[in-house]
């Protein structure tokens, strides 16, 4: 499998979490012969600091062109309720542009609930 992945590491703990996720992707690629092209872009508070917009046009174009988007956490006290531009608006715009409405995460049901009725 070949895939281009937009990596939007975000703010706070986001870059740390994305770095570990990229290590996992590298291991998966090596084990199963996949080729992932990773392209990073600013998103959230760091993008606000860099250009005044939490979802710069280049980041949006990259995300729309990508096969997948790996996104870390965004925001922090620096861009809190009193900030003129908030990172959360970038998240909502990105979801709207990509046609998604929620974060999807893997789920493992607890063993006691697997056969519950």
Image: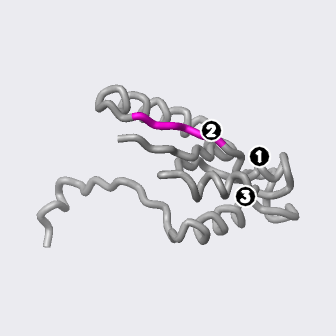
**Label 1, residues with CA under 10 Å away: few <14, some 14-19, many ≥20:** many
- Which numbered disc, 2 or 3, marks the residue that appears first in the sequence? 2
Residue at the image position 41 percent from the left and 34 percent from the top: 35
Residue at numbered disc 2? 15
Residue at mark 2 to residue at mark 1: CA–CA distance: 11 Å
Residue at the image position 68 percent from the left and 44 percent from the top: 41
Q: Are marks 2 and 3 in contact (CB under 8 Å)?
A: no
Which color scheme does this rendered protein use? one colour
- Label 2: state its secondary structure: helix
In the picture, the quarter occupied by the N terminus is top left
Q: What secondary structure prevails in the magenta region?
A: strand
Residue at mark 1 to residue at mark 3: CA–CA distance: 10 Å
Horizontal and vertical percent position of residue 5: 52, 45
- Which numbered disc, 2 or 1, marks the residue that appears first in the sequence? 2
Nearest the camera: 110 or 101? Answer: 101
Q: Which residues are magenta?
A: 35-40
- Label 3: state its secondary structure: loop
Horizontal and vertical percent position of residue 115: 12, 64
Residue at numbered disc 3? 55
In the picture, the quarter occupied by the C terminus is bottom left
Residue at the image position 53 percent from the left and 71 percent from the top: 99
Residue at the image position 37 percent from the left and 32 percent from the top: 29
Q: Is residue 36 left or right of residue 30?
A: right
Nearer the observer: mark 2 or 3; the answer is 3
- Label 1: state its secondary structure: helix
Nearest the camera: 73 or 95? Answer: 95
Residue at numbered disc 1? 46
Nearest the camera: 9 or 84? Answer: 9
Horizontal and vertical percent position of residue 65: 57, 55
């Amino acid at each position: 499998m070949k895939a281009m992945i937009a990596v939007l590491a975000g703010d706070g703990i986001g870059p740390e979490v994305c770095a570990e996720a990229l290590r996992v992707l590298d291991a998966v690629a090596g084990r199963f012969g996949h080729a992932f092209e990773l392209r990073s872009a600013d998103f959230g508070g760091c993008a606000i600091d860099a250009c005044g917009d939490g979802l710069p046009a280049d980041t949006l174009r990259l995300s729309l062109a990508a096969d997948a988007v790996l996104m870390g956490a965004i925001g922090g006290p620096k861009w809190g309720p009193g900030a003129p531009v908030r990172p959360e608006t970038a998240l909502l715009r990105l979801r709207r542009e990509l046609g998604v409405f929620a974060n999807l995460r893997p789920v493992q049901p607890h063993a006691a609930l697997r056969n519950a009725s």
